[in-house]
Image (tube, grey):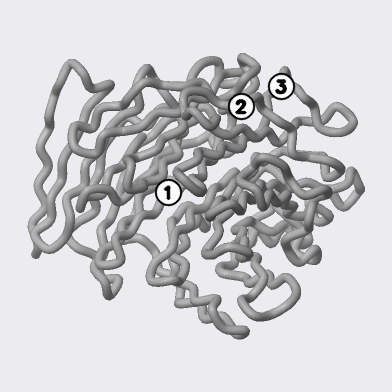
Amino acid sequence: MRSLYLSMILGSAMAGALLSAAFADGPPVRIVRLPDGGLQPQAVATATGVHVVYFQGDPKAGDLYYSRLNSTTLKFGKAIRVNSQPGSAVAVGNIRGAHLAVGKDDRIHVAWMGSQRAEPKAPAGGSPMLYARLNDSGNAFEPQRNIIEKAEGLDGGGSIAAIGQFVYVFWHAGPHTKNGEADRKVWMRVSVDGGNTFEKGEIPVNDPSTGVCGCCGMRGFALEPGLPIAMYRSATDRVHRDTYLAFTPIGAKGIRSIKLHDWRVNLCPMSSFSMTAIDKQLLTAWETDGQVYYSRIDISKEDPFVAQPQAVPGAGEKRKHPALATNNRHSIVAWTEGMAWNRGGSLAWQVYDADGKPIGKVGRASGVPTWSLVSVVNSGNQFVIIY
């Protein structure tokens, strides 16, 4: 059996505990806590560092901050507030927080669901889907903007993706009808100039027959320019809370919604999703019935290939909120355990080799705060988990 060792490193400059784990056949895994009691990290690694956005303050009406994490020292740099209106972000429910994307020239793009006090409002006074980007000088964020034009009814937050000058902001909403979630759709606004302006009007992303789970999160991604992708949970007949992938196939026309996993339950599980690229394919992860699953997907052909979903090893209580990273030789799935409404939990992770076989045992750490989740990146020949 391959060995796994953990060492605890304590330092006054670190906010919380930092763990380091190394595998005989895989990259090390390092763990770092957000500064100043931060929640809901979202991280992206580029050649210039690890870019992190996180929440602080009153969970009902708090603020978002952006910082760079040094992947060697695991110290955070100066924090810059993202939201231009104080208290315009929300953390309640785990899945309504900010999503982060990095575009051309490492421009930072952030999208989030606005709090009840957030301005500007969506149409009819509804919750806005807010967007802000780092300014040209890189020292502050531009004033926040509401992205919703007509598709109001935001509940489960949204997501963002960027590649080059393309920026995609996603959310799900629907008309106030007796069918409720069954009539919800995933929507998208598109920018082709790096977030300076957005094309007029929302674009429907998914097959409307699936519906969308109203208080579940979603995940947006861009595999290449002009190919936006969304993961979401359906609400067909109000009981089919299945995991779906929606996209436009390369070289084809029209929207495709592919079911990845079934889950029949008559409630909203308030779940989230993760997606990353691996060898020009997709690596995806999600929750089904208290377990975390992952799958590799090839959408380069008109008939996409979806690998059989695999559960992460072992068993744990209420496994939720998966996060993914890969270096194309190894991959990691991180997730939370034991979390529920207004309750914190613990962190777990598993590293895999190039063939998808687990390396070592499941790693664990305690102390994921209430309303939070985890993020993971590949940086500097190591995986870094932020929570």
Q: Which mark is residue 118?
A: 3
In depth, the one of 280 and 57 nearer the eye is 280
What residue lies at 91% left-to-right and 48% top-to-bottom? 178
Asked where in the image residue 31 lies, by quadrant, the reply is top left
Q: Nearer the viewer, residue 349 or 187?
A: 187
Kindly report the distance in space between the C-alpha atoms of the residues bearing marks 2 and 1.
37 Å
Residue depicted at x 73% and y 70%? 255
Nearer the observer, 209 or 89: 89
Residue type at tag 3: Ala
Mark 1 and mark 3: span between their CA atoms?
32 Å
Inspect the image, locate mark 2, and give the three-letter code of the amino acid beneath it: Glu
Q: Earlier in the sequence, mark 3 or mark 2?
A: 3
SS under mark 2: loop
| Residue that numbered label 2 is attached to | 142
Q: Along the horizontal axis of the image, is 259 left or right of 179?
A: left
Q: Give how far across and how far down residue 130 sits, in percent.
A: 68, 33
Mark 1 vs mark 3: give the one in front: 3
Q: Amino acid at mark 1?
A: Arg
Q: Is residue 86 left or right of residue 342?
A: right
> Quarter of the image containing the N terminus?
bottom left
Q: Which mark is residue 319?
A: 1
- In the rendered picture of this protein, how many numbered marks are placed on residues? 3
Kindly report which numbered mark, 3 or 2, lies closer to the viewer in this rendering: 2
For image coordinates 17% across by 50% down, the residue present is: 28
Q: Check whether the beta carbons of the residues at disc 1 and disc 3 lie within 8 A of each other.
A: no
